[in-house]
């Protein structure tokens, strides 16, 4: 299966900008998940957002494990970040748009 090596590479990859904190990974996971949800998955943009959300979700789970958080706590943190991301992106908050852009730039391309 071709996808398995790509996912494995993502699991062990650092962000192109270097290591990130758990909080940053959760923030990026929430923003990219929110943007993906708002965009939908049918367009090229939606697929790219989905890929970034997948990367950041996996990175946040891995960082959470390293920080001693349970998987349930890490999932809950991402859910809260996604809900907040939807609110901010729906309101077209400039800080959220800028943070989303940075998160996308730091996520590897999965295609």
Image: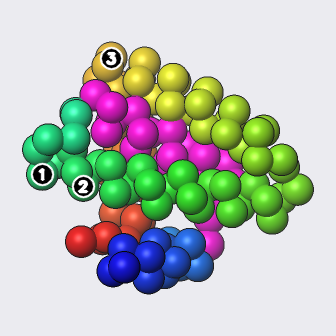
User: In the rendering, at what x and y percent does residue 28 appear?
Assistant: 50, 48
Residue occupied by mark 2:
48
| Relative to 22, 25 lies left or right | left
- Determine the CA span between mark 2 and mark 3: 22 Å
Residue occupied by mark 3:
91
Residue pictured at 81% horizontal, 65% vertical: 66
Front tag of 1 and 3:
1
Depth check, front residue: 103 or 56: 56
Q: Is residue 45 above or below residue 35?
A: below
Residue pictured at 22% horizontal, 34% vertical: 40
- Determine the CA span between mark 2 and mark 1: 6 Å
Residue pictured at 56% horizontal, 72% vertical: 11
Does the residue at mark 2 contact the one at mark 1 (Cβ under 8 Å)?
Answer: yes
Does any portion of residue 17 appear in the rendered image? Answer: no
Residue pictured at 31% horizontal, 39% vertical: 36
Residue 28 painted magenta: yes
The N terminus sits in image quarter = bottom left
- Determine the CA span between mark 1 and mark 3: 23 Å
Residue occupied by mark 1:
44
Does the residue at mark 2 contact the one at mark 3 (Cβ under 8 Å)?
Answer: no
User: In the rendering, at what x and y percent does residue 49 appear?
Assistant: 29, 49
In the rendered image, which quarter is residue 6 located in? bottom left
Does any portion of residue 29 appear in the rendered image? Answer: yes
- Mark earlier in primary sequence (2, 3): 2
Q: Is residue 27 above or below residue 106?
A: above
Q: Which residues are magenta?
A: 17-38
Please tell me whether the stretch drawn in magenta is mainly helix, strand or loop: helix
């Amino acid at each position: 299966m071709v996808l398995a090596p790509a996912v494995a590479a993502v699991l062990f990859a650092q962000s192109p900008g270097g290591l990130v904190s758990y909080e940053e990974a959760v923030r990026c996971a929430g923003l990219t998940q929110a943007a993906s949800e708002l965009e939908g998955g049918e367009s090229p943009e939606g697929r790219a957002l989905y890929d970034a959300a997948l990367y950041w979700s996996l990175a946040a789970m891995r960082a959470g494990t390293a920080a001693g958080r349970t998987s349930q706590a890490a999932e809950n943190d991402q859910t809260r970040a996604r809900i907040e991301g939807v609110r901010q992106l729906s309101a077209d908050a400039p800080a959220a748009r800028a943070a989303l852009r940075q998160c996308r730039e730091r996520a590897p391309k999965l295609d």
